[in-house]
Amino acid sequence: MTFTTETLLRRLAELTDVAGQPNRYVIAFSGGLDSTVLTHALASTRAVHQVPLLAVHVDHGLQKESPTWAAHCSAFAAQFGIDLITRRVLVDAGSGSGPEAAAREARYAALRSLLEPRDWLLSAHHEDDQAETVMLNLMRGSGPAGLAGINVIRKFAAGWLARPLLDIPRSVLQAYADAHALEYIVDPTNLDQELDRNYLRHEILPRLEARWPGAAGRIRRSAMLARESALLLSDLAEADSRRLGERSDRLSLQALRGFSAERQRNVLRHVIGQLGLPAPGAAHLDKIVTELVTAREDAQPLVAWPGVRVRRYRDQLYVLPTDELEPVASGVHVVRGDRIILPGGLGMLELLPGAGSGLSDAVVGAGLELRFRGGGEEIKPSGQSHTKKLKKLLQEAGVVPWMRERLPLLYSNGELVAVADLWIADDAAAAPGTAVHWQNRPAIH
């Protein structure tokens, strides 16, 4: 196999079927072998593709040579008449995700900020990178989506992220660089085999290639098949999710129990992803399927991982962000003004005088206090004939158990006069009156 500029132009033309015509090619230009070949090939064919070029060099500041590398990239871009932007980023090495992941996050954040509508961000990932990624994901126990590896093109920020060299071996790119006498940066950290990717690159993949020539290409083809499987599973999950109700954060257990355990896990991964929440591990999915879906109706099991809590109530499975369940402060809070900011991310109570019905002027004039449940509360709701335990009312109304202790209660002269915006006490009600409106109310049913 050889790599030529015609090869690159053909790959880019094929990608327009997905992304349309690009506004600009924005090149992620590290100055290493791969991005140098990509930049040179694009510059050499500018008269053919006629797409404006912008190179972006991200300086992570992790190496003492980084100023020299930035200068090299600037000189290379100038040599070929390409505009270049250098962005210095701060890498959070203590983020817990590892130095490679932290640098990648910082790099893509910088690149994302520069993309305009219909821009293509071009990355020089190649066949060997794909093989390394698939192997890393295999060692992590990934499913089809992880084994699909790197996608050749996907939506990114305001434009697209494309990798037109993904089926080209690194050795072929090296031959191109040698043939054109291209100078490029060699990052010494690429030799550090304490890093998993480098260990695969220098120890494992060469042995695989020695035993099975073309191993990286075979792994890439397997990744393509895994991607097809992942897309089919995504389509199935989308169809299944429509059978679970209108809301992704509230799923019908009756419908979910009609699926096999495998389909349950598949659709749960999908809806959690659709909600933009952190992905569950295999153990969490298994626990949802074996403990929550099959639990008796009056049980209140919980499956949680960072950022997410999954609960059930009656015939519904609830998928909740953790920040909706912050603890609330106990005690008595005197109400001043007509807006009450609630603790624990619960939103705000707004008092609206002159409404069709609500709290009487006498009750409001006597002063209001905000409290939360302590147990034993009673209220006779307006229009009803009997006083009831608040616990009973909440059960009858189908308020989910984990929100019952978080409902804001309004008191006047020591008496419960309003339960959030659900009920007003009969002897505290008037028409017209001051209505209670709960803004940004979390899901309570």
Image (tube, grey):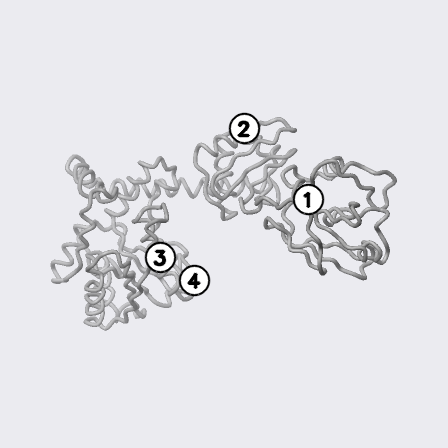
Question: The C terminus is located in which quarter?
Answer: top right
Q: Which mark is residue 108?
A: 3
Query: Which residue is label 4 attached to?
Result: 158
Which comes sooner in the sequence, label 2 or label 4? 4
Kindly identify the residue that appears in the image at 29 percent across and 56 percent down. 164
Kindly identify the residue that appears in the image at 59 percent across and 27 percent down. 295
The location of residue 174, given as percent across then percent down, is 15, 54
Q: Which mark is residue 381?
A: none
Query: Which residue is label 1 attached to?
Result: 372
Which comes sooner in the sequence, label 2 or label 3? 3
136 is higher (above) or lower (below) than 9: above
Say what secondary structure mark 4 lies in.
Answer: loop
- Distance in Å between CA atoms under marks 2 and 4: 41 Å
Query: Which residue is label 2 attached to?
Result: 291
Say what secondary structure mark 3 lies in.
Answer: helix
Would residue 282 be found to the left or right of residue 371 on screen?
left
Frontmost of labels 2 and 4 is: 2
Amino acid beneath label 2: Glu
Would residue 275 be found to the left or right of residue 358 on screen?
left
Frontmost of labels 4 and 1 is: 1
Which comes sooner in the sequence, label 4 or label 1? 4
Frontmost of labels 3 and 1 is: 1
- Pick the front one: 340 or 103: 340
